[in-house]
Image (tube, rainbow, N blue to C red):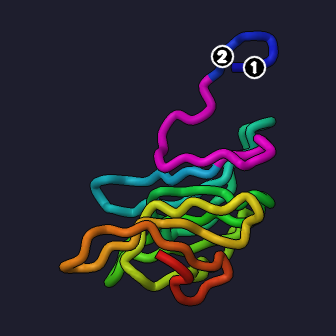
Amino acid sequence: VEASGNTREILKSGDSEAVSPDGSFMVYRKGSAESGDYYFYRMNLSDGEERLLTKKSGVWTTVSPDGKWVVYTRYGELTGIWKVSVEGGEPLPVLNENATSPAISPDGKIIAFIWRRAGHPNQIALASLNGGEIIKT
């Protein structure tokens, strides 16, 4: 909804959307279900300009409070937490654990997530956004 009260369509296709804390851009993934190729994009909300961030996408996307990182769950041998710059580039691992659904602390230093281990109930755990081991469950 615009300030005038009118609405406009922003995204025609895509999912796993997240809006930057300052509301200037959104991040989402789009691709082909047939090929299984999904990519992360960033769109400026003022003019609709799209930028490819990475060809290695995931789900449960969020943007860091400083607006510099996209943090998400990436699937592979183990499901883990990854991040990529909002300018694009090579994704970086944050946590190589079976982890999903990241949420970032207001100071941008800690992520909370669901930690899944075979034979154990799911737990909420904490780790540094800069990577490393689980700090607390």
Q: Which residue matches tag 2?
A: 7
Looking at the picture, does residue 135 appear above or below residue 115?
Answer: below
Mark 2: amino acid: Thr
Queried whether the magenta region covers residue 107, the answer comes back as no
Tell which of 37 and 6 is nearer to you.
6
Q: Whole-percent x and y of residue 74?
A: 44, 71
Queried whether the magenta region covers residue 17, the answer comes back as yes
Q: Whole-percent x and y of residue 14?
A: 48, 44
Q: Whole-percent x and y of residue 96?
A: 46, 85
At a point 66% along the width and 53% down the height, the residue shown is 42
Q: Which residue matches tag 1?
A: 2
Position of residue 93 in the picture relative to residue 120 (left or right): right
Magenta highlight range: 9-26
Tell which of 28 and 119 is nearer to you.
119
Q: Quadrant of residue 99?
A: bottom left
Mark 1: amino acid: Glu
Position of residue 46 in the picture relative to residue 1 (left or right): right
Within 10 Å of the Cα at label 1, are there few (<14), some (14-19), or many (20+) other Cα atoms?
few
